[in-house]
Amino acid sequence: MRTNLNKATYTVIVLAAITLIGGAFYLDKLELKDIGTGLLALLGTLLGATLAFRLNEDKESKKEQAVRRSALNRALFILARQKNAVALIAREMEPFKTPIERAFNFPAAKVPPYQDLVHRFEELEFLLNTPDVNVIMRLTVEQERFHQMLESLRTRNEFYVHELQPEIARHSLNGKEISGASIVQLFGERLFGTAMHSSEILRHHVESSLKSIPEMHEELRAVAKRLYPDSKFVGFASED
């Protein structure tokens, strides 16, 4: 918008100057040599203003492109950190192979809150004007999936610490592996069902995120490389 305004301003100035010079010549107020001198001065002023405008426009364009590259790199960095966060939880769950083991033997996992792992979608709005417009929507879905995974972990942790662990301690089962058909009778249907459900919901979110986050990272990085082929972008260890 600023570019169009500047162009319109220059056009008005030039037309006004030509009109004044033409009018003065028509009224015999100027001679041809005066007109030539005036036109040369006008031309010099116009060229100087145009050059200054172009330089400023180029400077603003370079600054804007740098901001966009930084936004893409930040989004890729967040995805990489999200992948590492999910991988950490997956490693802690890995020794517990069966649903029963995950529900009753997998302790509450202590992980950072990861409050800073949030995309700034307003910085990526420029993608709405590219052929890769749908990548933002997929990135929002991935963001929500990651936070659903964190929420399922927090929910399961709270249940384990405040409800399940006291019952484990009451039955003197601390440090022992819990298994067998007597679990329902031991803990009751509600505790048993909640323990099983919460751990399986967590497993589902962790496994889904382990697969989808690298895919999202690969897709966004490909978009970034198409837009800025000469720039470097955050990748995983196996990427160029």
Image: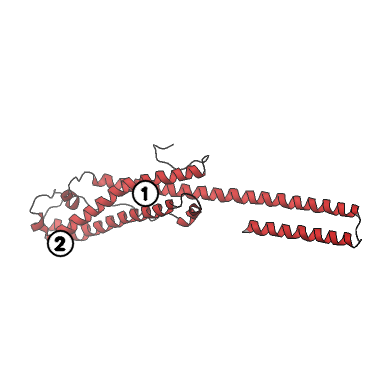
Identified by mark 1, the residue type is: Gln
User: Residue 206, labelled with which disc?
Assistant: none
Q: For the residue labelled by badge 1, is the local secondary structure a helix, a strand or a loop?
A: helix
Q: For the residue labelled by badge 2, is the local secondary structure a helix, a strand or a loop?
A: helix
| Residue 117 appears in view | no
User: Residue 190, labelled with which disc?
Assistant: 2
Horizontal relation, residue 126 to residue 147: left or right: right
- Tag 1 or tag 2, which sits nearer the N-term? 1
Number of marks present in the image shown? 2
Asked if residue 91 is positioned above or below residue 193 in the image, the reply reads above
Question: Closest to the observer: 75 or 221?
Answer: 221
Horizontal relation, residue 191 to residue 202: left or right: left
User: Residue 82, labelled with which disc?
Assistant: 1
Identified by mark 2, the residue type is: Arg
> Badge 2: how crowded within 10 Å, few (<14), some, or many (20+)?
few
Image quadrant where one finds the N terminus: bottom right
Asked if residue 111 is positioned above or below residue 231 in the image, the reply reads below
Horizontal relation, residue 222 to residue 166: left or right: right
Q: Residue 211: horizontal and vertical position, in percent? A: 32, 45
Q: Residue at x 48, y 45 (%)?
A: 224
> Badge 1: how crowded within 10 Å, few (<14), some, or many (20+)?
many
Image quadrant where one finds the C terminus: top left
Q: Residue at x 76, y 57 (%)?
A: 14
Q: Residue 192: horizontal and vertical position, in percent? A: 14, 57
